[in-house]
Image (cartoon, rainbow, N blue to C red):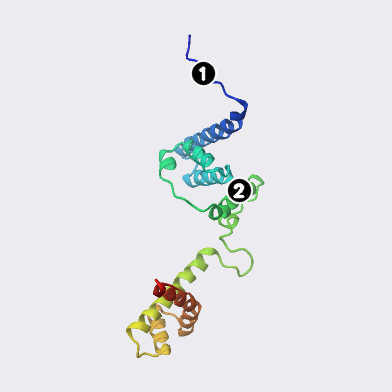
Amino acid sequence: MGKRRKRLTEDMLPKVSIYETNAHYFARLIDQFSKKKLESSAISFEALVALYAGDESENDRAELIRHLPVKEWRTDTVPVPRELLRPLVEGWLKYRENIAAGDITPLGKALGIEGSGQGKEGAAKVLERVNRDIGLANRVTELEITEPDTSFDDIFDKVAGEAGLSAETVRNAYRENRPRRDANIARLRKG
């Protein structure tokens, strides 16, 4: 006589279905990856969709993670606010739907990070400019502190020369970033 199986109850069926279906699905995706038919980034997006769409409770998310086929996916985790995942999940789903409908929309456009429309910059360009402007403002602040007798116009000219930009670009970057810098300094002083 064989080993007696534990009987499944009706209340277990939905969860068994969700977890086992996901486990099987991700195992198949890994197979496709190992055959070089699928990139790991596609599997990552699919995992995000599964985790995002999962039940709200921590126990259910933990159970879903426990069924992922790659050990590192189960053990090397980072807590991420759910709302940060929403645009990624929705963009990936939009991309998949567009492809299924025969619309070859680039992933970056589906995610909303490529410019669309006349004159609209993509996210990479905007992020590059934001980082540049913060760097310019920080350099002006550094010179403001280390060269207290130098006028702002001279500091703007010096930073502009270093960066190969106009003094007006440096001035605008400084003006835009100064309120946040001042608020941070005030917060640090309060301790």
Residue 24 screen position, x and y as percent: 52, 32
Judging from the image, what secondary structure is the residue with disc 2 in? helix
Q: Tell me the number on the disc at residue 5.
A: 1
Looking at the picture, how far across and down is residue 99, in whole percent? 62, 47
Which class describes the residues within 10 Å of circle 1: few (<14), some (14-19), or many (20+)? few
In this rendering, which labeled residue sits more in front, label 1 or label 2?
Answer: 1
Which of the pair 46/102 is nearer the observer?
46
Which numbered disc flags the more N-terminal residue, 1 or 2? 1
Name the secondary structure under disc 1: loop
Rendered view: 31 above or below 83? above
Query: Distance of mark 1 from mark 2, alpha carbons?
Result: 39 Å
State the image coordinates of residue 22 (x, y, percent, origin top left): 54, 36
Residue 49 % position (x, y): 56, 45
The residue at the point 67 percent across, 46 percent down is 101
Q: Is residue 20 depicted above or below 184 in this figure?
A: above
Dot 1 and dot 2 residues touching (CB under 8 Å):
no
Residue furthest to the top: 1
Q: Residues within 10 Å of mark 2 (few under 14, many from 20)?
A: some
* Residue 93 numbered tag: 2
Q: Residue at x 52, y 42 (%)?
A: 61
Identify residue type, mark 2: Leu
